[in-house]
Image: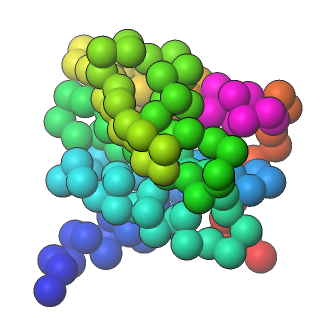
Amino acid sequence: KLPHYYFIQLGNALNNAHIFGNLITSHLTTVLHPEIVAETADFFLKHERIGTVLCTGLYKETLILSIRTGSEQINAGDLIKKLPLDPDNVGGHDKSAGGFVHVDKKNKQEVTAIVTRLQTAFAELLGYKSAVWRKLLDP
């Protein structure tokens, strides 16, 4: 059985998910358990049109990142190492990768700016220089 807050966090992830082409990004905001970020990335990869996913979530003073891909042409571990992150704080392999950014002493706007920068870099590294994201749940 999963606790009630798990479903609240899942709903938050869905409400904050954006799609462009075959990509989804979602920032879960504050999470109670860091593993929900990776679980949500796995969940979004099940979408019929999605090849690669970036999810983020704030756990305590740390921004958690998770990348998942179903593409044979993309190596998630290589991709995360190209994001504007400390290379010592990331790792992965062909289909999944993860990392973190210490955000202690940063306010909400600064964290949002970091997330936006990561999402933009994610799309650019995958060949989308001018991604126009739309909400996943828009009809």
In the image, residue 114 sits, relative to residue 16, either above or below, namely above
- Give the quadrant of the C terminus: bottom right
Q: Is 69 on the left or on the right of 71, as rendered?
A: left
> x%, y% of residue 42?
44, 63
Does the magenta-highlighted stretch encompass residue 4?
no
> x%, y% of residue 107?
35, 22
In the image, residue 106 sits, relative to residue 121, either above or below, namely above
Q: Residue at coordinates 55% horizontally, 31% vertically from top-left?
A: 79
Figure disc tally: 0
Which region shows up in magenta?
Answer: 120-128
Closer to the camera in the image, 133 or 93: 93
**Which of the 4 image quadrants contains residue 121?**
top right
In the image, residue 109 sits, relative to residue 5, either above or below, namely above
Q: Residue at coordinates 80% horizontally, 33% vertically from top-left?
A: 127
Q: Residue at coordinates 30% horizontally, 15% vertically from top-left?
A: 88
> x%, y% of residue 18?
65, 54
In the image, residue 21 sits, relative to residue 67, either above or below, namely below
Determine if residue 24 is in view: no
Closer to the camera in the image, 106 or 132: 132
- Give the quadrant of the N terminus: bottom left
Q: Is 33 on the left or on the right of 64, as rendered?
A: left
